Amino acid sequence: MTCAYCPFQGHRRAVHAHLEEAHAPEVRTRSEAETGRMFFSLSCPKCAQTMEKRVKPRWQDPGFLEEFSREIRLVAFDLLLYHLEDHEPHGEEKRS
Ligand SMILES: [Zn+2]
Ligand SMILES: [Zn+2]
């Protein structure tokens, strides 16, 4: 498969690792001031759909965002890969 952001190509696992290395800033995190709940989000560069998920409660300890941000990114990019696989002809649709 091809990376959603650049021409990098490889097996799913290679692309997954590449995403985390090269496109880490694409994953954003935010927390709700009132509830303290945390979320991460990632936009599909092909169709601008934004995927947002709640960060697992077990990850919610102080310093979490820094310490576990790599783990969050891996989960987020996994979601993106599933999303890309879901609507495959994606890239071609946009070109027309
Ligand atoms: Zn890339
Ligand atoms: Zn998409």
Image: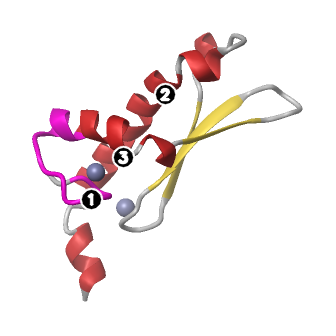
Residue appearing at x 26%, y 33% in the figure:
17
Q: Is residue 35 above or below residue 67?
A: below
- Callout in the foreground (3, 1): 1
- Callout in the foreground (2, 1): 1
Task: Give amino acid for label 3.
Answer: Leu
Q: Please check the rendered image and state whether residue 56 is part of the magenta-colored stretch, yes or no.
A: no
Quickly name the residue at label 2. 72
Image check: 18 left or right of 70? left
- First-in-chain label (3 vs 2): 2
Mark drawn on residue 80: 3
Q: Are marks 3 and 2 in contact (CB under 8 Å)?
A: no
Task: Give amino acid for label 2.
Answer: Ile
Residue 92, image x and y in percent?
A: 20, 76
Quickly name the residue at label 1. 6
Location of residue 15 (image quadrant):
top left
**Label 1 lies in ligand 1 vicinity (Cβ under 8 Å):** yes
Q: Which residues are magenta?
A: 3-15
Mark drawn on residue 82: none
